[in-house]
Image (spheres, rainbow, N blue to C red):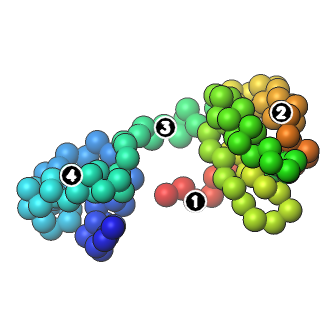
Amino acid sequence: MSITDSDRSLLALLSENARMPTAVLARKLGLSRTTVQARLERLERDGVITGYGVRLSSDYERGLVRAHILITLAARALPRVTRDLEAMQAVRIVYSVSGSFDLIAIVEAASISALDLVIDRIGTIEGVEKTLSSIVLSTRISR
């Protein structure tokens, strides 16, 4: 899969606003509309772009409570724990990581008490040996 600098610029614009019209993308990139459309189709076909998302307003996001949950697993528990985490609506992203923890789960909830329940529930998943939670206080950079 070959990604050009123009492709990276296109992806950066789409990450700012995935609904930006092709004509506007073309103007910002200094390319023709048909060239931009062809690049989008190629990036989708090649699996670079797998979907388009929603960027939530900062007012809405300020109402959410987020935490990073570091998780240590028992041996051979990864598939089961991953499946259980995936079933939890509050779990937004799960990363496999190196170091003293095996996973980092990014979770969000409507309140501290709801977040507390999510953290407790993660701790009771069979195969989870230990968790360490860090509640996100503010976002300093978001791209």
The local secondary structure at tag 1 comes to loop
Furthest toward the right, the residue is 129
Whole-percent x, y for residue 61 in the image: 58, 37
Residue flagged by tag 4: what amino acid is it?
Glu
> Which image quarter is the N terminus in?
bottom left
Look at discs 1 and 2 and give the one toward the viewer: 2
Crowd rating for badge 3 (residues with CA inside 10 Å; few <14, some 14–19, many 20+) = few
Residue bearing mark 3 = 57
Q: CA distance from mark 3 to mark 1?
A: 15 Å
Q: Which residue is located at x 66 percent, y 47 percent?
A: 94
Q: Is residue 106 above or below residue 32?
A: above
Q: Examine the rendering and report whether any part of residue 85 can be seen.
A: no
Mark 3 and mark 1 residues within 8 Å of each other at the beta carbon = no
Crowd rating for badge 1 (residues with CA inside 10 Å; few <14, some 14–19, many 20+) = few
Residue bearing mark 1 = 141
Q: Is residue 90 above or below residue 136?
A: above
Residue bearing mark 2 = 125
Q: Which mark is residue 9?
A: none
Q: Is residue 120 left or right of residue 22?
A: right
Residue bearing mark 4 = 41
Q: CA distance from mark 4 to mark 2?
A: 41 Å
Q: Which residue is located at x 28 percent, y 42 percent?
A: 19
